[in-house]
Amino acid sequence: MKPANWKQTQEEIAHHLELEARKRGDRQRAEAAFGGVDRVLEECRDQGRLTWLYDIGRDLKFGLRRLRRTPMFALTAVATLALGIGANTALFTLVNAVLLRPLPVPHPEQLVMLGNPDFNGFEVGTADHDVDGLAYTQYWRLRNQNQVFSGVLAAAAEEATIRVPTTPGADPETGPIAAIEMVSANYFDVLELRPERGRFFDPAEDTPAAMPQVVISDGFWRSQYHGDAGVVGRALRIRRQVFTIVGVAPSGFAGTSVGQVPDVYVPLQLQQLVLPGRDYLHDPPNPRRSVWLLGLGRLRPGVTVAQASANCNLIFSESVREQAAQAVTAQQRASLLTQRLPVGAGGRGASSLRTQFAKPLWILFALVGIVLLAVAVNLGGMLLAQAASREREFAMRLALGAKRSRLLRQLLTESLMLAAAGGVAGFFLARLGERALVSLVATPGSGLSLALGNDPRVLGFTAVLCLLVGIGFGMTPALRLARTQLTVKTEHRRVPAANALVVAQVALSIVLVTGAALFVRSLDQLHQVKLGYNPANLMTFNVNAVSGGASPAVAVDMYQRIADAVGRLPGVHGATFSENGLFSGRESNDELTVEGYTGPESPSSQMDKVAPGYFAELGIPVLLGREFTSTDRSRPVMPIIVDQAFVNHYFQHRNPLGQRVVVHFSDGPLPTEVVGVTAVAHQQSLREKPNVPRLYFDIFSPRSLADLLDANFEVRVAGPASLDRAMVRQTVAQVVGPVARVNDFSSVEAAIESTLGPDLLLVKLTGFFGVLALGLAAMGLYAMLSYAVARRRGEIGIRMALGARAATVRMMVLREAMTLVVFGVAIGAAISLIESRAIASLLYDLSPDDPTSLAAAALLLAVVGLFAAYLPARQASRVDPLPSLRESAQ
């Protein structure tokens, strides 16, 4: 451009900026702000102090002005960064909450877990090798005899969910649902916590005769009592007993098990008031143990975890020898003596979520990292195009004496400013999205909940992410500037690096889209699993009459009357019940002796106790023999029904009817006889292997009644709206009165979906990440082609002046775009084959090299690439040759 024209252009730009500033009314404020910054920086420079701060300040000021001149570019960059950083921050929040975060207590590194931290539930029976948890008597012995801990606490491995009226005379069914955690009286003392209000339990009162007292959580206090300072001393009813609130737990504390957020804490010694019907505090006169506790010990100074493990297992072995002395057979005695107590670091508490979600979360974390890499590549391309348009500016500054390092620093400063703005926006975006992520892990039907809270780790992670991303995408134009010879009259050259960035974006998109396709197809395979019965219009609920004070014999009669009454309700086709239920997460297993079986492994089987007519009501075919009848209860040998997998595994070509099977319960062997064979049915998981043997007991048999507590009902209805909780609750109350209550009311289809938590998490998040990656790839391809068309207007004009048709020009641009897409797809496909092997264990009945998923991802990228390239191609085909020729001639 000629000097006169250049001066005129400068004057026009200045006049235009002045008019715009006056319209916005911010010119004076901007000048005052910049002027104030300038004065402070110049004073520092003149006094020889903080010269580095002066340089950084000048870079920041220039960068801000530069971004103000290109608001659309700045907004696009910040929005893109916010999505990438926000997605990573939100997922890291979830990873941190489930897998990494220590308990919010003083010195969590001093805590040691006694038991399997993944244990969640109640176990009644015997065990071998590493045990899951502790019986109460074992905890008491460890607490009083150890030499390595300053204190040992115990907490129930599973919460009890009960309605708790906050006023003594209220209807039990109208109170809020509370998660009740039974803990030792020294629970809060060992954790070194201080109450928010009132006090904690007094260990001196740790006896069954103690006054019924509870400590409530800070969240329960605020939600149910509205933060009333006078809550201490108020009454709270749990089942039939009125408790007194003595304190409020500190804010931010959510128990010692991730995935469980207790509302009410009750001393262990009051177990019978919370879970009546069975004594969990004393060992029975047989080898069976009620394993329901996890222990946490606080190490004394100088004691290591290894020393603690040795001391604890020495004490634990004494209880094991006493248990083994009660064994019925020498084989059972030898098995019991192999028991060992796992002892490990307990600073992160316990969590059954870690085993279930650890691998899916880490894989998702890697995939969302790829999304962030795609964001950085996209912004690198945008900055590269912008830097190419600033080559004349850089050349002039170099000609006036500026160092190339000074220009590099300026580019990195601008990229870091964008990263910081995107990080702030992304952090707040993550706070909005983290609850949605938690809902995918702790679904309403799972009984799980997560307390996120404020964690400085998340803020630190976001800050580090901003720094790395800012440097990452800022290096692209900086490296180009370092290697390019600039002149004041810079020719319009092609930018090969931009093409490479587009190829990289397509490759990254293929990886994400292929992963999403694999998980979608895997989930579809799970939904295609044949259950062995029709789950549609099948409702389920749980009733525990024993917890209301009924004996097992009376309770099972109540359960039959409930099933009969519910079966007569309008819109109900039939009702039955079993002990473990369908997709409830409960399972039983014991070793067997099968008559005539000589296989290499010791026989065992999954088990359940069912009512007569169970298989007919569910629609599970009886292939041989019959179902249970009332006459079976007087038979000298207990009848059982087995499934086809049991027959295939243990009887092979023999007729199973009449065959004898000895079930080795922990309190002795039980001879049984096969009276029926059913088809294979999935009871607890869609991933159950169809060849796993299963047998069924009559729930009315004397042996079944010995351990019966609750029952799970299965009700076949005409439609989803044919049965509701209120109708069931009313029917149960009419049959048995207020003794029994309705829990876990759900459809079987909803219960099945709740077991697919990890699969749904992977599908939903990888789908979101895949769509985001596609958008970034389309944006990058569109931006690169639009910029290339703008820079090649002269070349395109010449082509059209020489006779090239518009269609030819369009095909030229589309061909260049699809070439980049093909290269990206080829590279991404190779990476996807490696990725698919890493996620193979999470797929169901699907090869990690599934060609359908890869082909679908490639086709989708090709379609997106065509759409992204069409507008620039159309723009190129409409170039006017004459202005383009004049511009290229200047």
Image: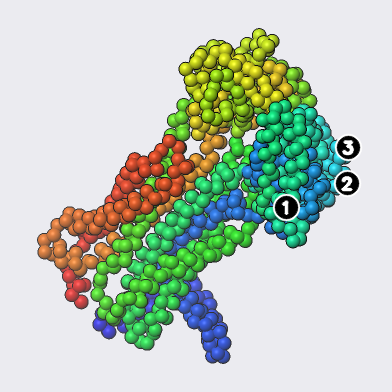
Residue at figure coordinates x 36%, y 57% from the top left:
505
Q: Residue placed farthest to the top in the image?
A: 631
Give the residue type that dot 3 points to. Answer: Ala
Q: Residue placed farthest to the left in the image?
A: 803
Residue at figure coordinates x 48%, y 66% from the top left:
468
Q: Residues within 10 Å of mark 2 (few under 14, many from 20)?
A: few
Q: Quadrant of residue 697?
A: top right
Q: Which residue position holds label 2?
A: 204
**CA distance separating discs 2 and 1:** 26 Å
Q: Residue placed farthest to the bottom in the image?
A: 47
Left or right, 423 with respect to 884, comes to: right
Q: Which mark is residue 91?
A: none
Q: Which residue position holds label 1?
A: 308
**Colouring style:** rainbow
Q: Which mark is residue 209?
A: 3
How far from the left and from the top, in percent, is residue 89?
A: 53, 57
How far from the left and from the top, in percent, is residue 230?
A: 83, 48
In primary-sequence order, the first of circles 2 and 1 is 2
In primary-sequence order, the first of circles 3 and 2 is 2
Q: Nearer the viewer, mark 1 or mark 3?
A: 1
**CA distance separating discs 3 and 2:** 11 Å
Q: Are marks 2 and 1 in contact (CB under 8 Å)?
A: no
- Is residue 207 placed above or below 303 in the rendered structure? above
Circle 3 sits in a helix, a strand or a loop, which is it?
Answer: loop
